[in-house]
Image (spheres, rainbow, N blue to C red):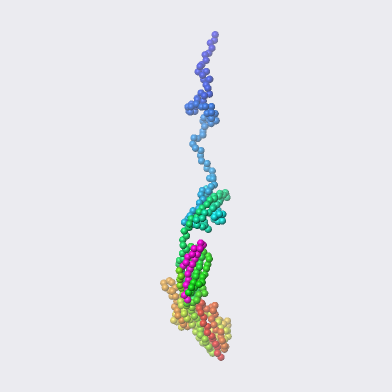
Amino acid sequence: MTAAKAKNPKSQKAKSRSPRRFLHSVGRWCGWGFSFSAFQLFSFFLIGCGSTGSDNPAAPHNGPETFRITYCRVVDNGSDMHVQWSASRPTSGDFRYGGTNFNHLVRDTVRADSHDVALTGLRDSTQYIFELTVRDSVNDSLTSIGTFTTPVFVIAPLQISGLTITEITESSARIRWQTNIAANTVLYYGRTLLADSLVNDSLVLHHDVLLSGLNPSSTYHVRPESADSTHQRGIGADTLFATVIQMLVGFPDTTVALGDSLRLPIFVEDAEDLAAMHIGLSFTPGSIEVLSIEEGPFYSQHDGFIFFSDIHNSGGQAFGDLTWNILYADSQRAGTDADGAGVVAFVKLRALSAGDAHFSFVRDSSFALDAFAVQRRFGLQTGSVQVTP
């Protein structure tokens, strides 16, 4: 009888291992040392025991930053209000604002990381609405809206300073002054009362007014005033100046016998800082002729000389230029040698026909220059030249 093989209990036991015991073995192989439930089994086969996934946090996303306005604010800059803004990309922008609607606009067309733009036309202690629109390099845009309130602005008072009165002649003077705020130009003037005024509405810091049509040897009052864009006024001091005494140039009544010659004196009165003269003379051609223009005693007394003479008998005209030395105090012109009165020149004439020679000054060609190269008209006293038979 053949004996039957006995069954190996261990072998039989191994064949009858339950799934739980199998997972327990797998867990020991993977080093976990714990048992799995059915759900954990499913997860094990889904993930895999030998997964290469990292236990570290996920790496950051390095794509372009979202386009956004970083800040938009309206700030008090001490004397005015400024809008400031920045975005996550360089932008340009339009800032619209107003009391109840957007009736003001400031624009910054330069694309930059941040912006600071002054606002104008604001009132004290007033709330405003605003809308900011920014654009990047590809014309993507964002909008921010809000409100701001202005404070009570402390505005520096308008001040007038540096009043000067220069270029004074017999009939004119130049008045200048400065203001600390851009303002208009108003000058009141008069001999006894400030009855007249000159106005320039341009808002400037440096003010310049030329007064003309004044009387010679007269005292004038002037008072500068200015007003800025907010109608704040500055008033200067009432100041006096005197115009120059008007110089007189002329010649006396003269008679000359037909065929004879004479030296007609040209005199000056009230000369003051006289540097040069240009004298123009006219006459009837054929009645007389001008032979020469010669120096008079006023030259030898005051170191002057005839610079040039030009005679046109056929055209009935003669011209003479006369000059005097200019005096200096250090490097500044202080005056000339020519002050006072006397005969500045002789015009040598010869009579050609009897009657009135109509000898006179040419007004447009008779003038003087003072030591400061300011042109001055002078009074003319014209006598008559008669040729007797």
What residue is shown at x 46% (from left), y 81% (from top)? 341
Residue 198: % across, % down: 52, 70
Indicate whether 358 appears above or below 75. Answer: below
Q: Magenta residues?
A: 218-236
Residue 82: % across, % down: 50, 55
Indicate whether 140 appears above or below 315. Answer: above
* Main secondary structure along the magenta-highlighted residues: strand
Indicate whether 93 appears above or below 320. Answer: above
On-image quarter of the N terminus = top right
For the residue pair 164 and 45, the one nearer the viewer reads as 164
Q: Is residue 278 visible to us here?
A: no
Q: Is residue 69 magenta?
A: no
What residue is shown at x 54% (from left), y 47% (from top)? 67
Q: Is residue 232 magenta?
A: yes
For the residue pair 310 and 91, the one nearer the viewer reads as 91
For the residue pair 21 and 227, the one nearer the viewer reads as 227
Residue 14: % across, % down: 51, 20
What residue is shown at x 45% (from left), y 66% (from top)? 161
Q: Is residue 363 visible to us here?
A: yes
